[in-house]
Amino acid sequence: VVSPAPAIALAGLSALLGERCLRDAASCAAYGQDNSRRHAQPLAVLQPATVAEVQQVVRIAAEAGVPLTARGRGTGTTGAAVPIAGGLVLSFERMDRLLAIEPADRYAVVEPGLLNGALQVEAGRHGLFWAPDPTSLPYSTVGGNLACNAGGPRTVKYGASRDNVLGLCFVDGRGELIRTGTRTTKGATGYDLTRLLVGSEGTLGLIVEATVKLLPLPAARAGFLAVYDSIDTATAAIVALMQQPELPAALEFMDDAALALVRARGVDLPVGAALLLVDADGAAATLPFTLQALTQAARVPGLVELRQAATAGDLAALWAARKALSPALRSLAPGKINEDVVVPVSRIPELCRAIAGWRIELGLPIVVFGHAGNGNLHVNLLYDPADTAQRDAARRGLALLFQTVLALGGTLSGEHGIGLDKRDWLPAAVGAPALALMRQLKTVFDPAGILNPGKVLPPI
Ligand SMILES: Cc1cc2nc3c(=O)[nH]c(=O)nc-3n(C[C@H](O)[C@H](O)[C@H](O)COP(=O)(O)OP(=O)(O)OC[C@H]3O[C@@H](n4cnc5c(N)ncnc54)[C@H](O)[C@@H]3O)c2cc1C
């Protein structure tokens, strides 16, 4: 039974959207989850097709006090798109157009539901690309990428979503349409609302249009993998690589557990305690010099083997090792907590040493890999959810991880965001004054508290 205010809202939404207001249990169930495997049943799923419809939906929801959770494609890993407070899910799947592309000014204007992969195809026709490259690129949306500040391997050189957006149009919690930012690559005009919205996970406003920065596609790529005899020596190489002027286009790390896992699946890799995968890109004429600088930096004492990719096929083979990891993890245990913590690059050995201790203390496999150039490591705690002791150990491992990362001067998330899973750690990460300011901002943007309630900020 739906109580009176939501019932009136649902009647208004059905009148507004017709069959794009889905109320059957099966549709609601399908839109009630994300990749966190959490689930909550919404009252209805809305599929607006225009900005005006989004504004109208927000006004109806605000008046009735009904929660509204924005949704791209539900690939988020933190429960951010799960409608835990019930209410409405607003899916942007019908707002997926490329509105404009301006190669001369290097930007594109897109609707939020456009898939990142589709944008790459369109930009590629003009010799351009959008830098954010999450592994979920083929099936996650630009709106979702911006809402989570998604990134990927090439963030080390080109930045994450926040660094590659010029302006936004968003609808706030009152239904007001607000335009932010510029269409230029410079701008010093007032507060930077664009970057405030990025990473706000649908709690401050609904992004209905984005002007994203495009970059020229590099003409050539090359790369190598390097295996080291210890985590410390691999970290020395990471520091050396990041201290010299030639930025790698990707600098990925795997610890010994990750290496063993990939090797066990038949990928031919040298034996060692840690692996770095380094990519370079640029003009064909200058790439050899970049590569030479990078290989030189990677040759620190403790290097076991450096394997260079001579061709595009070789490069793909090197990346096969990295890509084999995620599926391989599933063979170790049915449950996985995959965190994306960040520490200053020089503190990676301390984090890895702590993790080695937790493997013994908790009795759980822990596999570490990730975007080392940014100090952004995916720490995977593997366990059996059906086993109470293992479940408790995994939970304890998570607390140890977050405490340690913060103590090392790092932060909770590099790219997945906070969502539901990490919100209780936000106070420890940002401190009381910043948290209080965030709560005030939330009230300003969303006075009725309807936009994705219960996410990012912990309950008071
Ligand atoms: C296999 C796999 C690999 C992944 N790899 C990476 C990776 O390498 N790097 C990375 O960063 N992430 C990765 N992710 C996580 C996820 O894909 C990203 O967070 C992605 O940005 C989510 O996009 P989405 O469209 O699915 O958004 P959703 O999951 O639907 O939503 C995510 C959040 O954004 C909000 N939101 C969505 N659209 C809007 C909008 N228009 N306005 C306001 N808020 C909105 C939602 O309310 C929610 O809070 C991966 C996920 C999977 C399943």
Image (cartoon, rainbow, N blue to C red):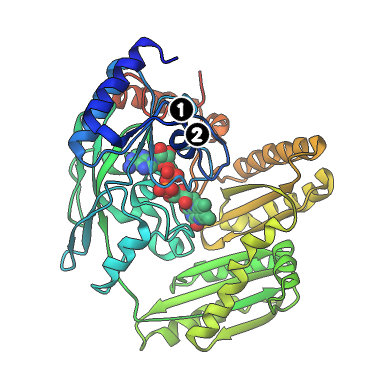
Residue 398 on image: x %, y %: 68, 40
155 lies left or right of 55:
right
Question: Mark 1 belongs to which amino acid?
Answer: Leu
410 vs 94, nearest the viewer: 94
148 vs 433, nearest the viewer: 148
Residue linked to disc 1: 435
- Mark 2–mark 1 contact, CB under 8 Å? yes
Residue 235 on image: x %, y %: 64, 65
Residue 58 on image: x %, y %: 27, 27
Q: Which mark is residue 244?
A: none
Residue at 49% of width from left, 63% of height from top?
153
Is 9 rendered above or below residue 163? above
272 vs 87, nearest the viewer: 87
Residue linked to disc 2: 430
**Residue 24 occupies quadrant:** top left
Q: Is residue 201 visible?
A: no
Instruction: Answer few, some or many: residues within 10 Å of disc 1's Cα (few below 14, many 20 plus, some between 14 and 19).
Output: some
Residue at 20% of width from left, 39% of height from top?
51
**Among the two numbered marks 2 and 1 on one chain, the one whose residue lies closer to the N terminus:** 2
Cβ at disc 2 under 8 Å from ligand 1: no
